[in-house]
């Protein structure tokens, strides 16, 4: 099991790396995270057609060379605002649990967590478990279903990782260890210092002193690695790519700004754009952030009307409209497509009513039934900056309540949006520069990337192998095998 001293310490990254490392030993491997809180989700096969798990566990399954399974993330919490989350249980929305007090909810969920974990342990040689946040949140101990309660149930050999780049790493490790119960401390087999910059010799005598205090060795110091290629799990990676080396290079850079509203969802699908030479990806939170953008992307949203209200409060609605009026490329994905239209109509209290940005003459009606499915679909004839996608077939996935259609009155007056994919999955404006689609994952599709950029980003499989190589190089010899009591 991989535990962390905080969110962002490197748990998801390390769990993914270990899944591929052990799979390369010829072992049958599965990932597991009892409860994930994230608006980044992927569609998998489950007991009902179209199920969701957290994106991190989806990628971990692929790294393990396993088929993604709802049992790998039995509970997914998708925040809708600061005090409410949608509960996904074994891949399906549970309205009843979403309305239940979270402390009561934990006990109701624990039997499902145990059943899923035990089934994976029975079916696999290795289960690599990821914790959440910190295992030493003493105010949450009584309702823990994701950290030490899981570790104790499985009697898992635990690694504890910390982000040394934040500072205070030894205090974080010692304080976290000290707040655990003795039977929990007994499971900690090693400390991991992540995101280290500088000469590792300067760490001495810290690791030795920490081992004297705790009895736990520091088994790895992982150097900072910016471009590992794995999508970020908990938030946006705001650090910009390096500046172009010359004015000529600067003139050829494609600047893409993704609007980062508070309830952004599936932001991990933009990771491939960070790996394409000549592309500069930034996150836009104010109008100035999109002034020089060649493309602006409105991504998915867990609560479209709220994020649209936020966008207006920042003045980004005018900036986006000005960008489109100048004929520059504008892309809306899922919730972003809904925002581009004339109106949001919500009769069931799902995503809220409100006026759209009016950049596509379409209207979205929210349905109680959620569409969750993987999908392959082809673009028809497009024009303008998106013309290269004409005829391209892409693999993607749908996760949405909305259904979008032409605004009948505007269509009658001659203001048309052009359907450019079957089943109302994608629309383009008459000028050609505004495109909206429901399918997530276009930048993870090699045919789309080839059509838009002339080449593709590194494959996920090569990313997973790179992660496994990295941990194999930087962990002390024999440690990873010893965690499984292997010879």
Image: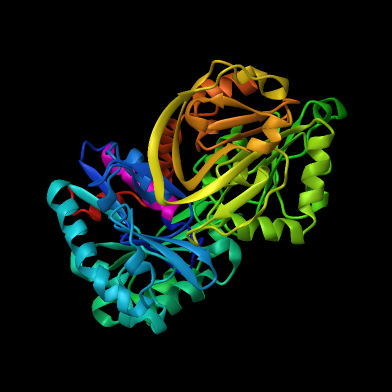
Which quadrant holds the N terminus? bottom left
- What secondary structure is the magenta-colored segment mainly? helix
The residues colored magenta run 12-23
> Which residue occupies the foreground of this view, 368 or 334?
368
Residue 96 can be seen, yes or no: yes
Q: Magenta span has 19?
A: yes
* Residue 422 point in image, percent of width and height: 49, 25
* Residue 64 point in image, percent of width and height: 30, 41
Residue at (27% x, 81% y) in the render: 182
Residue at (63% x, 57% y) in the render: 307
The image quarter containing residue 329 is top right
Q: Magenta span has 437?
A: no
List the single residue furthest toward the right: 247
Q: Could you tell whether 87 is left or right of 279 in the image?
A: left
Residue 199 can be seen, yes or no: no
* Residue 326 point in image, percent of width and height: 84, 33
Q: Could you tell whether 305 is left or right of 359 in the image?
A: left
Residue 259, placed above or below residue 160: above
The image quarter containing residue 334 is top right
């Amino acid at each position: 099991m991989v535990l962390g001293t905080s969110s962002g310490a490197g748990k998801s990254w390390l769990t993914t790396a270990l899944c591929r490392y052990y799979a390369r030993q010829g072992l049958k491997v599965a990932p597991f995270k009892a409860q994930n809180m994230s608006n980044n989700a992927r569609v998998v096969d489950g007991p009902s057609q179209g199920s969701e798990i957290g994106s991190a566990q989806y990628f971990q399954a692929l790294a393990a060379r396993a088929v993604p399974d709802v049992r790998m993330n039995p509970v997914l919490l998708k925040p809708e605002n600061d005090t409410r989350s949608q509960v996904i249980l074994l891949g399906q929305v549970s309205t009843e649990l979403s309305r239940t007090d979270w402390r009561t909810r934990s006990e109701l969920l624990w039997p499902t967590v145990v059943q899923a974990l035990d089934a994976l342990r029975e079916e696999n040689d290795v289960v690599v478990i990821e914790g959440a946040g910190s295992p030493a949140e003493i105010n949450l101990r009584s309702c823990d279903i994701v950290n030490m309660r899981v570790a104790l149930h499985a009697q898992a050999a635990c690694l504890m990782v910390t982000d040394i780049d934040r500072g205070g790493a030894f205090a974080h490790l010692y304080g976290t260890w000290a707040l655990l119960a003795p039977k929990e401390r007994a499971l900690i087999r090693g400390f991991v210092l992540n995101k280290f910059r500088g000469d590792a010799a300067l760490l001495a005598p810290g690791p030795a002193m920490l081992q004297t205090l705790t009895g736990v060795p520091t088994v790895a110091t992982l150097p900072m690695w910016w471009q590992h290629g794995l999508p970020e799990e908990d938030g946006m990676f705001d650090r910009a790519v390096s500046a172009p080396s010359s004015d000529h290079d600067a003139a050829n850079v494609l600047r893409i700004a993704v609007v980062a509203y508070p309830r952004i969802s599936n932001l991990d699908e933009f990771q491939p754009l960070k790996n394409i030479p000549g592309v500069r990806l930034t996150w836009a939170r104010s109008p100035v952030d999109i002034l020089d953008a060649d493309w602006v992307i409105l991504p998915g949203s867990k609560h479209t009307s709220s994020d649209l209200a936020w966008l207006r409060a920042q003045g980004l609605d005018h900036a986006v409209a000005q960008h489109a009026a100048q004929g520059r490329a504008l892309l809306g994905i899922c919730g972003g497509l809904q925002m581009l239209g004339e109106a949001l109509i919500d009769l069931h209290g799902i995503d809220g009513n409100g006026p759209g940005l009016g950049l596509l003459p379409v209207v979205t009606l929210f349905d109680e039934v959620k569409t969750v499915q993987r999908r392959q679909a082809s673009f028809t004839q497009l024009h303008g900056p998106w013309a290269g996608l004409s005829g391209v077939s892409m693999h993607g996935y749908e996760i949405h309540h909305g259904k979008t259609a032409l605004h009948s009155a505007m269509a009658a007056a001659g203001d048309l949006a052009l359907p450019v994919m079957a089943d109302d999955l994608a629309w383009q404006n008459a000028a050609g520069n505004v495109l909206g689609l429901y399918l997530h994952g276009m930048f993870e599709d090699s045919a789309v990337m080839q059509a838009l950029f002339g080449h593709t980003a590194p494959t996920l499989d090569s990313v997973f192998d790179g992660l496994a190589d990295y941990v194999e190089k930087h962990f002390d010899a024999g440690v990873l095998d010893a965690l499984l009591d292997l010879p």
